[in-house]
Image (cartoon, helix red, strand yellow):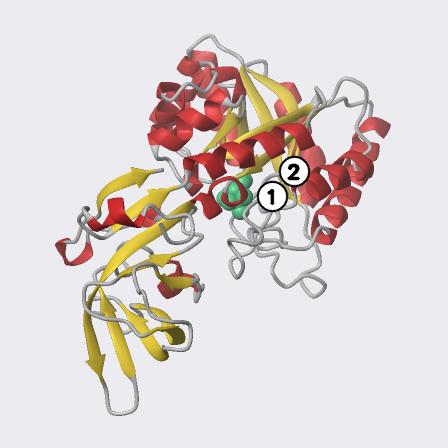
Amino acid sequence: MKGNFPVQEFERLTTPFYAYDIGLLGRTLQTINESAHEEFFCVEYAIKANHNPVLLKQISAAGLGADCVSGAEIKRAVECGFEPRKITYAGVGKRDDEIILGLEAGIGCFNVESLEEIEVISQIAAKMNLVAPIALRINPDIDAHTHHYITTGLAENKFGIAKEWLDLAVDKVLSLPALKLKGLHFHIGSQVLDNEPFGILCDRINEFQDHLESRGIKILSINVGGGLGIDYDHPDENPIPDFEGYFEMLRTRIKLRRGQSLHCELGRSVVAQCGSLISRVLYVKSGVNKKFLIVDAGMTDLIRPALYGAHHIIENITASNKEEDVETYDVVGPVCESSDVFGIDESLPVTHRGDLIALRSAGAYGEVMSSGYNLRSLYPSYYY
Ligand SMILES: *Cc1c(COP(=O)(O)O)cnc(C)c1O
């Protein structure tokens, strides 16, 4: 066994496949529950990060809610044991049939992203003789120059309702009998490693609350969204993100009113470190000035490097070389795209055809973003 991987088991399997460290997921969930122990915390898992049923069942069993972005995700969440009242449905483009599905399932909240959507949900709920619980996703318009990695909380993008329209949106929801105003929802972006952007969001939320209160409007819940980042460079040293610091910051910086609940929607930080993509080396190809490891996993199996320029730590998990026998390789996939590259100038033990490599920290936005391009497919996942 090398590192934490059951390499001998892996040797028997057909690659490429995802391997999930279920024990690590369990410890991560325990840390979340201990760090957010107060009644008012409602932690939801953002299913879009990974909708694998094995993981979902473990996450629902730990008591988390689910943040869904499609009707199919709502269905999957219910099938995997999430209580409907702990399910939130978000997204800028909800179809009528998905709204109906959410209402029929009795989900806890619709996070609404436009004035137009408020009308549509109201009409559908009225026709079904139901009252739809609504949170308004407000775009907090946090300064991009201070925090360049905040990409979804800026003034002009497709997400959320402009903060200038907060009053208009609130009044609209309150005027429609088929809607119940539950709260305000925010989300500033993803892979945020510094707590301060969340702190700035908290300050902004306090201002919104003060303003609404001055108008005599009470809200029941605040939802700060997701986005907590993970340490892609040190998966073994930092397998579990700093949930304690994150929840402590929320606890101290948001002025929660009596009886209010504080929701968050964590995706990546829950599942990223427990997943690895396991692949076999097909060829060690000598270029003119370079050596390439051509592996049997590609961008169709893990698209983050090609899509965002992301880097996942690459390890040879079968090489038995001594430490000093290292070589520099470009690690590439078999797909007919020049962006199908996992790493440039990777320093690895001298590697041979048939060796297994692990692409670490791939549990979030990995398996779920795989595609059938080139008619490729992944092999069944492994759990250990
Ligand atoms: C993507 C998304 C999340 C989860 O983001 P992570 O970075 O994976 O934590 C939560 N809320 C909303 C609204 C999202 O779009």
The answer to which of 334 and 89 lies nearer the viewer is 334
Q: Is residue 119 left or right of residue 366?
A: right
Q: Quadrant of residue 374 in the image?
A: bottom left
Residues packed near mark 1 inside 10 Å, few (<14), some (14 to 19) or many (20 plus): many
What residue occupies the far top of the structure in this picture? 129
The answer to which of 327 and 88 lies nearer the viewer is 327
The answer to whether residue 114 is visible is no
The answer to whether residue 77 is visible is yes
- In the displayed structure, would residue 262 be above or below residue 232? above
Circle 1 is placed at which residue position? 187
Mark 1 sits near ligand 1, with its Cβ under 8 Å away: yes
Q: Quadrant of residue 114 in the image?
A: top right
What x and y, as percent, mark residue 203? 80, 44
What residue occupies the far bottom of the structure in this picture? 288
Residues packed near mark 2 inside 10 Å, few (<14), some (14 to 19) or many (20 plus): many
What residue occupies the far right of the structure in this picture? 214
Q: Secondary structure at mark 1?
A: loop
Quarter of the image with the C terminus is top left
- In the displayed structure, would residue 308 be above or below residue 368? below
Circle 2 is placed at which residue position? 224
Please report contact status of discs 1 and 2: CB closer than 8 Å, yes or no. Answer: yes
